[in-house]
Each structure stands twice: as structure tokens, then as C-alpha cells.
Image (cartoon, rainbow, N blue to C red):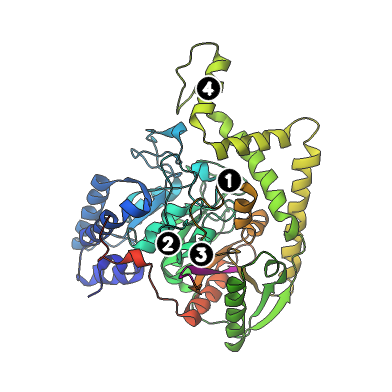
Amino acid sequence: MTDLADLTIVAAGRGLRSGEFSSVDLLDAVTRRASITEAQLHAYLTLDKKGARSAAEAADAAFADGKDVGPLQGIPIALKDNMCTIGVETTAASQMLAGWKPPYDATVVRRLKDAGAVVTGKTNLDEFAMGSSTENSAFGETRNPWNPDFVPGGSSGGSAAAVAVGSAFGAFGSDTGGSIRQPAALCGVVGMKPTYGLVSRYGLIAFASSLDQIGPFARSVEDSATLLDAIAGWDRFDSTSIDGAVPNFSGSLDGGVGGLRIGIVSDLMGEGIDTQVRGAVSGMADKLSEAGAEVVEVGLPSTEFALSAYYLIAPAECSSNLARFDGVRYGHRSNVEGTTEDMMSHTRAEGFGPEVIRRILLGTYALSAGYYDAFYGQAQRVRTLVRRDFASAYEKVDVLISPTSPTTAFPVGERSADPIAMYYSDVCTIPSNLSGEPAISVPIGLDDKGLPIGFQVMAPSLGEELMYRVAAAVESISEFTKRAPLASSEVVAP
């Protein structure tokens, strides 16, 4: 008999509506799974047991009264701990915000609650979303459910691990340079970054405002589209959100790839890409061709410089955004005696971890007088070139494909002392953040160590419908149905 925690969102929804089980049953299933796996994985920072129970009971009462607000009603969903959630501790995995309980919900959180979702809790991340392994959390690292000796990716590693292991049916993360897609690839789940502005950033604790975007983690492409349906759309509280009609993404999955022109990005298939990852992506490209698509090589030459440009733009914006954490308004405040300047200096030294401090210093330097044009200004010019490369590519093809990550998951601690090696983990995902266009990672197999391989599909701005159509075809062709070893209800906690 299938454990309820292993169901997809769509299957769980069918069971709820048929009366086969209740929302409380689903919540009990994921809570039981978390009680087994959290000691090894640490996917969550906070499990909101009381709030989740109340929401599940309310969902069951609504079903009993004949009220059905949509496919997420009664479904347990997790949130990355950089999304403001009223009355629930929200830390961004930083000592700077330890104990802080927001007085309001982020727009995404409010929309999920309006859709009847049951928020299970807040998941672990790299501090302030700065990292690629979820080892930079001030509250301990998250481990990979396929092998706890390996990282889950980052910065949304807790959300990816929770979905992979079954302690949530779906989850949300934020993607600034690949922080949804890369951990999705390393944990063997579906992770999607929408077009910049499609989803409101109101209530998201900002890292780099021109790059950040909230998106879903799920066990299937259909579940991913269902989650995006619930949160997409204009928000008057976010001036960068797009004011326009929002398609029904979950209705965009049929049609296959016949007649489509698909470009495989040659610049993301060369040196630095693991041979097994490259082989799996090439093999899937061949299968897409057999399914009726025309697959051609496409160059994005500016992606050679995208990583360098990103690591100037993102730190510069983080330097500005994190200036608000000064011990005066909210968050941690040092008890040191002395001047206001002394207090602020000690507050930031005590509250921020090493990676956050590294990026603040880098960003402040890039924005300083005499260096602004040489560093930040030049990086923005590279960003323009990246956008032009994508625009040129989409004149020739409908979508682009590539690996999601240059490697599968790497051992815990292997890259902690080597920031350059760690930053390279995002080389395949960063270009879509710089261009602001949508991209999705779909698992397509395992390497010889039994670790998942992710396949990335990229599309033009607001091209989510076509992107999901291709992703659904990739999922169908790959038939990747294996679950992470720790996703078994028979696992015994150490």
C-alpha cells in the first residue's frame, strides 16, 4: 500500500475529493515522515504543527460543507524560511533574524492560504539565500535524501529535500541564481523559476531584487504547474509584478514536442560539465528528436561571462538590501557598549555569517566610488549581452535545453573552503536569472553513485506554457519514478 506521504499533489487531491482520506490524514503522513527523516536531513527550521493542524481541519470542514476553492485545498505545502509568514518565526537561516515573527504574510503565502493549502512549516536555506549547498545556514546544514553524506544543493535545499523525502507534497523556494533549479536537480525533483515579475516578491526577504523570483518544487511537472497556478499574477504591493492575464499552466502540459524546434546550448555542454551529466542530457535530446522535435545546437556566447557578471550584480544588490539590518529597526542588536557606530558594527559582525559578509564586502567594493563603472557597470553591460544572446536564440528555436547543474550532488564540506568551486555550481542556471526568463529542472536519471541528474528547459519571457509542455514530454520520456532512499516510511531514525 502506498504511503500517503508519497502521493503527488494531483493524486492527493483526487483522494481528498473522493473521501478516501482527509487533509488531516495527509498532514499526519508528512508529519510522520518528517519525524523519521529530520534527524538525518534537517530540511525544516520550523514545523508549525499547531497552525498546520488548524488549517487541515479547516480544509476538511470546507470539503464537508461542499466548499472547494481549488486543487491545493487541504494539501500540505512547505515554505522556504525567507518568506514572511504571519506569527511564524522567519529567519532567512540567519542569527540576524532569529526569533523574528513577521506581522504579515508574503503575497505568495497569502495566496496559498486563500487556495486552501496547509502550510507545514519553514524550510532551511543558505543564509539570506546566499549559497549553493545549504551549508551556510546559521542553524545547521541540510543533507541530501539520496545520500546524507552529500549536499542537497542550495540555497533552497530544505524545500527540495522536503519534497524529495515526502515531508511535504510541494514546497516553495526563491531563485536568484539557480536556488530552485539546482537543488531540485540534486534532489531529484521538479524545480521551476518563473519569468521575473510573474510572481510577487512582496514579503520575500530580499537578496538581489532584480534577480530574485519565487517558484515551486514538486514531484511532477503537473504538480509544479498546479502550484504556479495558485501564486502567479499581478500584485499591487510589488511594483515589478507583471499586470496581465495569467494562463492556466496546468492545462498546458499536453501536446508533446512534435514540430517544435529545440536548441541545445553548446556553451553549457562543454568543459566543466560532468561526463555522466552531459551524456544524460545528450541522450534526452536524442529522445526528444525521436519524439518529433527538431533539435539543433545553439550558442549563447555571453554565458561565458554570466557567472562573473552575476557575482558582481548580486553582491552589489545584497550590499544595499542588507544595509537595513543595523540593530536599530528590527532583528539582532549587539549589547556592546559604545557609540551607535560601534553597536551597528558589532551587530552586523555577530548577526551575519561568513558567506553573507563575503558578499556584502564584495558588493560594497563593486559599488564604491572609482570602481562602480569598472565592476558593477561592466557587469550590467554583460547582462545586456546575455539578454541579447537569448533573444537571438529564440528567433531560431522555441525553447532551449541544457544540464541544470554541471555535476550531481557533491559531498558535504567538499567545496566549503573553495568559494569559486561552489559558485560554479550555478553556471548553467545563472543565465536565465540575468535574462529574467523562465526555466525548469526535471530529473531524468541517476549517475553511477545513485545521485539524480537534472535536465533544464528554458523559454522566452512569459513562455511558461510552452516550457511546461516540453518539460512534461521530458518527464514522460525519462520515466524517472525512483524515490530518494530516505523517502521510505520504513527508514529508522538514527
* Quadrant of the image containing the C terminus: bottom left
Asked if disc 3 and disc 1 are in contact, CB closer than 8 Å, the reply is: no
**Residue 210, position as x, y percentages in the image:** 63, 46
Say which mark, if any, is on residue 185: 3
Structural crowding at the residue carrying mark 3, measured as other residues with C-alpha within 10 Å and reported as few (<14), some (14–19) or many (≥20): many
Residue drawn where x is 75% and y is 47% of the image = 379
Asked if the stretch drawn in magenta spans residue 455, the answer is yes
- Residue position marked by numbered label 4 in the rendering: 346
Distance of label 2 from label 3 (alpha carbons): 18 Å
Q: Residues within 10 Å of mark 4 (few under 14, many from 20)?
A: some
The residues tagged by marks 4 and 2 sit, at their Cα atoms, a distance apart of 41 Å
**In front: label 1 or label 4:** 1
Q: Nearer the viewer, residue 102 or 371?
A: 371
The residue where tag 1 is placed is 417
Q: Earlier in the sequence, mark 2 or mark 3?
A: 3
Residue tagged by mark 2? 227
